[in-house]
Amino acid sequence: MADAPTPVMFAIVTTNKDAVIGGMAPVFLAPNEIERDRIAMWICRITNAIAHDLHNGTVILTVNQATSSS
């Protein structure tokens, strides 16, 4: 039986730079929520990522990491 793919945080798009501290994912700072959503939409389209709105001015984008079958 195959394991489900593991989601991996790919990028962060936010209007609040203070909401993001450190980490390994690139952070895109948007001036407002309209621009935040536009940036997230285009990154998702280009990379086939999935957007998750945290409802605090921040959207995280994830991609599914392929798992190896043994």
Image (cartoon, grey):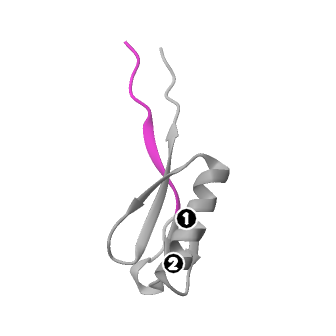
Amino acid, disc 2: Ile
Left or right: 9 in relation to 28: left
**Residue 65, relative to residue 16: is it above or below?**
above
Query: Residue shown at 59%/46% (left/top)?
Result: 48
Taking 49 as reference, is 60 left or right? left
Q: Secondary structure at mark 2?
A: helix
Is residue 3 a member of the stretch shown in magenta? Answer: yes
**Amino acid at pointer 1:** Ala
Res 70 visible? yes
The answer to whether 46 appears left or right of 53 in the picture is: right
Residue under the image location 48 percent in, 84 percent down: 17
- In the image, 5 versus 49, the foreground residue is 49
Label disc, if present, on residue 34 of the rendered structure? 2
Q: Please state, as top left, top right, bottom left or bottom right, where the N terminus lies in the image.
A: top left
Q: Quadrant of residue 20?
A: bottom left
Range drawn in magenta: 1-11
Residue 19 % position (x, y): 39, 80
Residue farthest left in this picture: 55
Looking at the rendered structure, the secondary structure element under dot 1 is: helix
Does 62 appear above or below 60? above
The residue pinned by badge 1 equals 40
Is residue 44 depicted above or below 39 in this figure?
Answer: above
Residue at x 63%, y 61% (from the top left corner): 42
Tell me where residue 45 appears, x and y as whole percent.
Answer: 62, 52
